[in-house]
């Protein structure tokens, strides 16, 4: 675990804003996932943090990958580019899922050579896949309850359960093989009941498909959503894993291969950021600090991910409720209106931990400020 003292030293040594990736933590998270869900093949959702070094470390750990675009596919592919063609093809089939239900035609055309496993959730997409990636295996993404998740996904993705088997049979009529079902219970799901309901729904649909003569489904993809321990209100992963493991054992025979697409769980706690106070003011009686990282940059998860990242000081002293702003000219660039901070001075360093997921990944160049510099530790 990277310490506060190390973060401070790295901030001074490399300059700020700085994004620090701890590869020991990545390995630990991956191993924890595998330990508590041994039946589940873990496909790291690259979108959570596509840094090639992160993908590399997880590749070396034996992870599989969920990609959502051709650039993400290529970040993963780089790891096997040099392996013999046959072996590489087997690896891709076994270790990559293209889990974006809506794919551009050009992407499908490029993917087709790899005989990829791809998701879909509507008839239009099936016709597109048939025309542009006929060698693909398909997985039907279902709409499932996302109750209480920090990031809701079911409003945009997933076939309604009532249309599921019709879509599976349509895939077959088009000459495609529907390999199985997938879902996503919403990101940072602390309501474990979402998984229980989604698994029950999938078991019913496996049965309905079989009753209607379709018996080729052999995989179930339980998506992402596994919560990162941002604070102690989040129940330990092993509790969720116990629930999921029990339901999988009860509902799905051993021959059904189980996949998951954890993003946040693997990477959130593996990264921290360090930035610097570049200005200070008292606004409406509140100490207010302007730092050189913000919501257009590493703290982008405040906007896109609905996530909060407490900002901590290295300096000690009596604390007051303070505001922390990013460096850009936009009044939206607010990291927090209420952080407990000691009196800070210009040039003081501040930091946030557990900021590895959906943060650096959605950093922009807005206002001419580039994304934070990245350093890797414990590689
Ligand atoms: C299809 C899909 N799989 C996996 C993930 C990763 O989810 P999480 O980071 O909650 O584990 C996402 C996140 O948006 C997703 O859309």
Image: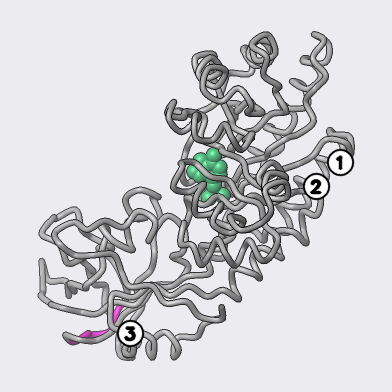
Q: What is the C-alpha distance between the residues marked 1 and 3? A: 49 Å
Residue furthest out toward the front: 84
Q: Distance between the Cα atoms at labels 3 and 2?
A: 44 Å
Q: Is residue 171 above or below residue 34?
A: above
Circle 3 Cα neighbour tier, 10 Å, few/some/many (<14 / 14–19 / ≥20) = few
Residue depicted at x 38% and y 69%: 310
Query: Which element carries disc 1, helix, strand or loop?
Result: helix
Residue closer to the observer: 56 or 187: 56
Q: Position of residue 174 (x, y in %)?
A: 64, 11
Relative placement, left or right, of 330 versus 207 is left
Q: Residues within 10 Å of mark 1 (few under 14, many from 20)?
A: few
Can the viewer see residue 147 in this picture? no
Residue carrying label 2: 245
In the rendered view, how is the structure colored? Answer: one colour
Nearest to the observer: residue 63 or residue 113: 113
Verify CB contact (< 8 Å) between mark 1 and mark 2: yes
Instruction: Check disc 1 and report the residue beneath it.
Output: 249
Q: Quadrant of the N terminus?
A: bottom right
Name the residue located 13 percent from the left edge and 77 percent from the top edge: 280
Which stretch appears magenta?
341-345
């Amino acid at each position: 675990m990277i310490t506060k003292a190390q973060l401070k030293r790295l901030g001074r040594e490399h300059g700020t804003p700085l994004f620090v990736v701890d590869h020991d933590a990545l390995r630990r998270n991956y191993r924890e996932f595998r330990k508590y869900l041994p039946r589940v093949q873990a496909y790291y959702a690259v979108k959570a943090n596509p840094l090639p070094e992160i993908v590399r470390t997880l590749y070396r750990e034996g992870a599989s990958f969920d990609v959502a675009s051709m650039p993400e596919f290529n970040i993963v592919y780089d790891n096997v580019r040099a392996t013999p063609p046959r072996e590489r093809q087997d690896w891709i089939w076994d270790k990559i899922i293209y889990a974006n239900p809506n794919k551009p035609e050009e992407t499908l055309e490029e993917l087709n050579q790899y005989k990829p496993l791809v998701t879909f959730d509507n008839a239009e997409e099936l016709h597109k896949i048939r025309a542009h990636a006929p060698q693909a295996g398909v997985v039907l993404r279902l709409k499932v309850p996302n109750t209480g998740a920090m990031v809701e996904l079911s409003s945009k993705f997933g076939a309604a359960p009532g249309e599921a088997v019709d879509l599976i049979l349509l895939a077959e009529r088009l000459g495609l093989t529907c390999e199985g079902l997938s879902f996503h219970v919403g990101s940072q799901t602390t309501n474990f009941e979402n998984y229980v309901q989604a698994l029950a729904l999938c078991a019913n649909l496996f049965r309905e498909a079989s009753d209607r003569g379709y018996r080729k489904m052999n995989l179930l993809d339980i998506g992402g959503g596994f919560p990162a321990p941002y604070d102690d209100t989040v129940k330990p992963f092993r509790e969720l894993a116990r629930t999921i493991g029990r339901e999988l054992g009860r509902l799905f025979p051993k021959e059904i291969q189980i996949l998951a697409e954890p993003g946040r769980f693997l990477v959130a706690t593996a990264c921290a950021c360090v930035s610097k106070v570049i200005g200070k003011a008292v606004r409406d009686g509140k100490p207010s600090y302007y730092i050189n990282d913000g919501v257009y940059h590493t703290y982008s998860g405040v906007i896109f991910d609905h996530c909060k990242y407490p900002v901590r000081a290295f300096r000690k002293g009596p604390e007051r409720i303070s505001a922390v702003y990013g460096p850009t000219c936009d009044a939206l660039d607010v990291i927090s209106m209420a952080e407990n901070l000691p009196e800070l001075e210009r040039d003081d360093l501040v930091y946030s931990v557990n900021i590895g997921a959906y943060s650096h990944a959605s950093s922009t160049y807005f206002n001419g400020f580039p994304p934070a510099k990245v350093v890797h530790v414990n590689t």
